[in-house]
Image (cartoon, helix red, strand yellow):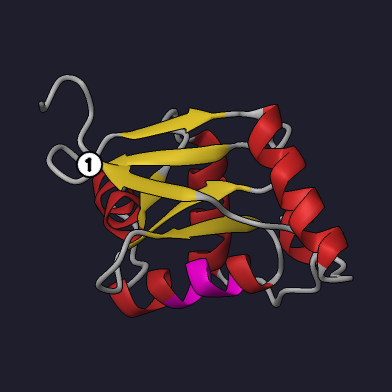
Amino acid sequence: MDLLLKHNIRSTQARAEIAKLIFSLRKRHFSAEDVLRNLRRKNSKASRASTFRTLKLFYEKGILEAIDLGKGFKIYEVSGNDKHHDHLYCLRCGKIIEFEDKNIEKLQDQACRKKSFKAFKHTLRIVGICKECK
């Protein structure tokens, strides 16, 4: 697959299947369990361990972004799909709501300037309860 070649990743059947799957998922955010469930539906031979290792590798190579939701649980999204956004995460139902806020971005830029810090990227995750779960 071109994606693996482009990122200098050795191609295996499992990696190619996972790459094809993550780019075809209709869900914007997905967990390793979501990937596994979809692979099983397609009768893939990719193992659980191989799937977790591949997602980690794709994250390390910049193909995926990872959002740590705590206690070792991560969700992923494909990198570079759109402009920067942040996330609201509902503790009850697991819903993830994307949002953009220019004021937050300005405050982060100001904080970096004050500390003479060069930021390359950032992640903001706000944890709480969504309106449907209140």
Q: Main secondary structure of the magenta part?
A: helix
Q: Residue at x 24, y 50 (%)?
A: 37
Q: Is residue 59 magenta?
A: no
Neighbour class for label 1 at 10 Å: few (<14), some, many (≥20)?
some
| Residue range of the region highlighted in magenta in the rendering | 53-57
Which quadrant is home to the N terminus? bottom right
Residue 113 appears at what percent x and percent y? 87, 60
Q: Is residue 56 magenta?
A: yes
Q: Camera-side residue: 51 or 113?
A: 113
Q: Camera-side residue: 30 or 1?
A: 30
Could you tell me if residue 39 is visible in this image? yes
Which quadrant is home to the C terminus? top left
Whether residue 102 is situated above or below residue 115 in the rendered picture:
above
Q: Camera-side residue: 104 or 100?
A: 104
Residue 81 appears at what percent x and percent y? 69, 35
Q: Camera-side residue: 128 or 98?
A: 128
Asked if residue 116 lies left or right of residue 52, the reply is: right
Number of numbered discs? 1
User: Which residue corresponds to mark 1?
Assistant: 94
Q: Residue at x 15, y 37 (%)?
A: 93
- Specify the farthest residue to the front: 114
Helix, strand or loop status at disc 1: loop
Q: Residue at x 49, y 56 (%)?
A: 18
Asked if residue 113 lies left or right of residue 62, the reply is: right
Residue 20 appears at what percent x and percent y? 56, 47
Whether residue 26 is situated above or below residue 121 in the rendered picture:
above
Whether residue 14 is situated above or below residue 134 in the rendered picture:
below
